[in-house]
Amino acid sequence: MMRKIGVGLLLLLVFIPFYAFKIEPNLSVVHRLELGDQTQPAELKVVQLSDIQVSESYATNRLDKVITKVNQENPDIIVFTGDLFDNYAQYDHEQEIINKLSQMKATIGKYAVWGNHDYGGGASRVYEQVMNAANFEVLQNTGETLTLANGKQVFIGGLDDSLLGNPSISGTLAYRQDYDYSILLTHEPDVADGFIGTNTQLVLAGHSHGGQVRLPFYQVKNVLAEKYVRGLYELSDHTQLYVNTGLGTTAIHARFGVTPEISSFTIHF
């Protein structure tokens, strides 16, 4: 009996690292949520990606399955909440990234914000150019109001990165005029508290990787992702915050209990 237990534990100790380094990082799951006043018809489909962190451990061909899943959602808007690169100085592959991101289709538009890794390793020189070439508009303390086919107006704004950039909530909201629904993008989720009381309906963030490796009674937390780590939150004024756990990895190129995520929102208002 003890021998069987010992063999079982040994197999477990072998399997867990193999799964964490070789299997789970190569998976991706679509999390679908219905938001807003669901007594109203669905007005908007928004798909969120975050923390791709392209690197030697996340080569651009890994995006092929992600592209297929994103396009199957038929999004009106695609948003990317930062950290395209893991370490640009070591792995750039700009044209390959542009080619992949260009294949993601949205009927209204594609938007992005800066992440802290997009400033490091020389990435700041190319990040906006790469995203623009892939038809993403990079919002850096700016925003714009979109008029839908039914005449309703949606504001989408984005903060600069809160660790290495110069974020301005007031500057971003200065672009907001008349609107029926407001979406704000930020890389780091804990700064979402700054939108409390501003009549913002939805904040989308990333950065946390959901802890990347989740063990019983232990969860890794990141700077400015300590309060809000993964999934949907409701802030004190009923603003909704969603923290996407990202697609790639950093530091340790493993995931355990935090499958790479694509989040898809059907919004009613």
Image (cartoon, rainbow, N blue to C red):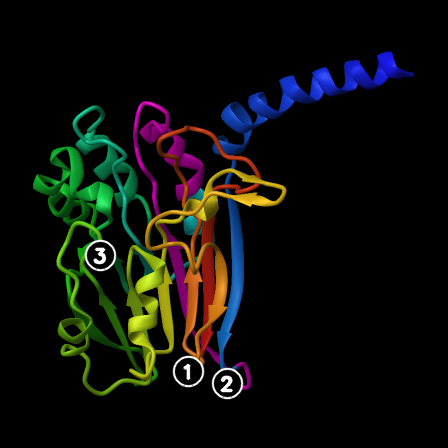
Q: Which residue is mark 3?
A: 162
Q: Residue furthest left?
A: 125
Earlier residue among tags 1 and 2: 2
Where is residue 128 shown, x and y percent of the image?
13, 48
Q: Which residue is mark 1?
A: 237
Inspect the magenta stretch and tell me whether residue 211 lies in it.
Answer: no
What is the three-letter code of the residue carrying label 1? Asp
Q: Between label 3 and label 2, give the one nearer the viewer.
A: 3
Do callouts 3 and 2 mark residues in contact (Cβ within 8 Å)? no
Earlier residue among tags 3 and 2: 2
User: In this rendering, is residue 239 above or below 21?
Assistant: below
The boundaries of the magenta stretch are: 38-67
What is the three-letter code of the residue carrying label 3? Ser
Disc 2 is placed on an element classified as loop
Quarter of the image with the N terminus in it: top right
Q: Which residue is mark 2?
A: 40
What is the three-letter code of the residue carrying label 2? Gln
Residue in front for this viewpoint, 62 or 113: 113
Residue at 11%, 42% (x, y): give it.
124
